[in-house]
Amino acid sequence: MLAEHPSHLQSVKRHIILVGKPNSGKSLLFNQLTGLRQKVANFPGVTVELKSGQMGAFEVVDFPGTYSLSTLSRDEEIAIEKLNEAVNSDVTALLVCVLDATRLERSLVFAMQVQALAKQHGKAVVFVLNMIDEVRRFGHHIDTQALSKALGSPVFALSAKSLEGVHEFKQALPELVERADQLLPEHVSEDEISVIQRSQSLAQEFGIQTDVVLKRQNRIDAFLLNNMLGGVAFLAIMFLLFQSIFTWATPLMDGVEEGIGALASAVTGMIGPGMLTDFLNDAIFGGVGSFLVFVPQIMVLTFIIGVLEDSGYLARAALICHKPLSYFGLSGRSFIPYLSGHACAIPAIFAARTIESPRKRLITMMTIPLMSCSARLPVYALLIAVLIPEKVYFGGLIGLQGAAFFGLYFFGIIMALVVSALLNRFTRDNESLTDMPFILELPTYRLPHWKPLMHRVLNSGKQFIRRAAPVIFMVSLVIWFLGYFPQDQGLQNSYLGQLGHWIEPIFEPMGLDWRYGVAILMSFLAREVFVGALGTLFGIDGAEDNLVGLASQLQQDGLTLGAGIGLLLFYVVALQCVATVATLRGETGRSRIAWGLVLAYGVLAYIIAVTVNTVIG
């Protein structure tokens, strides 16, 4: 709740509420005002939670983007509920409504509704004309003083991307808060029809003509949304996306591997032989070090998805995918959570809130774990390096290993669609609400805002390390201890070897020995643990001369093609993430669904792996 009792106001920072329609640049303006680097995306509904940040003596609260106070979806309903709470709160000092200067009519409908709501509670509204640089690029000028007089509230023109006018607006905010009582408009439009008519009139008088803005956009859309060419372009973009994960990251991965190897040699050389050196070689540099090598791939994936988001292409991709996805009981909006799931399943499950149909939302959430998230990247990269030769074609543009990457991601998507079709067939009678029409705004094409994007890329690597490294360290520590003792008995006769041989019959049909079995069981805590666990196991097993090159160790060990491909497909399907299970339980409200998926996907993954190993051998 945002409301506070008046007696507490002196100890609570006053709030400046930031609202606006999706794709208005609101989140980017929030970043500029507060100095935070929040995610900025160019498709509706990405901001489904409140974000706040400090700006001097005030707290700026970024509200989810909505088109109208008349809600159509659950995420808009939540947003409007929170907005009503904020407007009714004594803590709220001012509302800032962000308008898309290139699409003034669409922005003004929501803006004037907010203005009327705010006046009912004695709150002032300030309007911000964002993207004013793009308006000027089209040779148009907006008279902000005349628009301010027409609206009855102050209007500021700025560009959150180029920072034009942002500093001046930030400096003006404290004064606007102080005289907020004087900024209340005398007359506001309240009923929906009059709001729409007035927004059309004001947009015609002050805004840029829509056909001018859409002229270039339509030329590009004529190609990207073409029934035939658009589909080909979509597949090509997706293929290059996954190809780049392997190709672009390889030099960075090689650099990290060489750096870890040099550090390992330097540290262990100073210590000398002994138990401590064995621990550092096997558990730290062999376990945790093997995992760190693959962090650059996660950063490359984040960069590519960020470019697609910020450029405006993701909304087009959702539109392209709507018809084929509808055959499997999904919506075009399911594409956005699916693609987000290739970075991490947890925010992807949250993103599914934007799907209006409860059934389609549930099906999407239940199949998101089949998308190959970034935690699988280290596993894929390791096994592909072992099984697939480094052959390149077309001057190095396409590599065989990159194509294998694409095949794994594609297999995950196909499995998700098949499972979605089955779930749609068996849950159709449980639909509690009528499906709503698929409506999606296509944002204008824009160049990404590189500074927040690069911050997002670096942050993805740091967050991945922060989340996974402690788990991998603890697992590596346990594995090293169990594998090292009894001392001088060898890995086969260690505590870990005894446990591994006990569970080995489960994994023999997959063509794997007990070491892989131990790593698989450990990875049910988190998939990326698999690489660290194998690194520790093979380090203990006498690979002192090759501390980080785990792929070459597996090749020398003789992993067969059938067992390797089966293991890869096992990791595509199996749900091995406790955090994802907890998120599914929270979003669905049912533990039975979350743990049922763990069991179902685990059994299916095992059957696939055994079948592939049996057929290929």
Image (cartoon, helix red, strand yellow):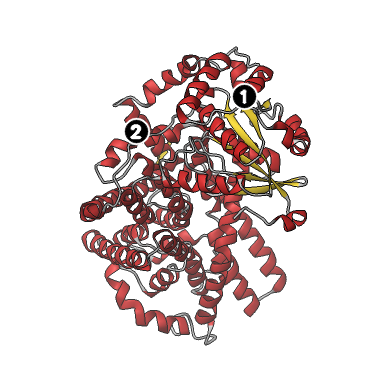
In the rendered image, the vertical position of residue 29 relative to residue 150, given as above or below: below
Residue 116 showing in the rendered view = yes
Which one is in front, 161 or 512?
161
Element marked by disc 1: helix
Which one is in front, 56 or 283?
56
Q: CA distance from mark 2 to mark 1?
A: 38 Å
Q: Which mark is residue 320?
A: 2
Q: Residue 393: which quarter of the image?
A: top left
The C terminus, quarter of image: bottom left
Measured as percent of width and height from the top left, residue 62 is found at 61, 44
Measured as percent of width and height from the top left, residue 193 is found at 45, 26
Q: Is residue 560 left or right of residue 490?
A: left
Residue visible at 66% across and 28% down?
A: 153
Measured as percent of width and height from the top left, residue 234 is found at 37, 33
Residue, disc 1 = 151
In the rendered image, the vertical position of residue 409 relative to residue 541, given as above or below: above
> Pointer 2: residues within 10 angstroms few (<14), some, or many (20+)?
many
Residue 394 showing in the rendered view = no
In the rendered image, the vertical position of residue 146 relative to residue 430, given as above or below: above
Q: Which is nearer the N-term, disc 2 or disc 1?
A: 1
Residue type of the residue flagged with mark 1: Leu
Measured as percent of width and height from the top left, residue 135 is found at 59, 19
Which one is in front, 185 or 374?
185
Q: Nearer the viewer, mark 2 or mark 1?
A: 1
> Pointer 1: residues within 10 angstroms few (<14), some, or many (20+)?
many
The N terminus, quarter of image: bottom right
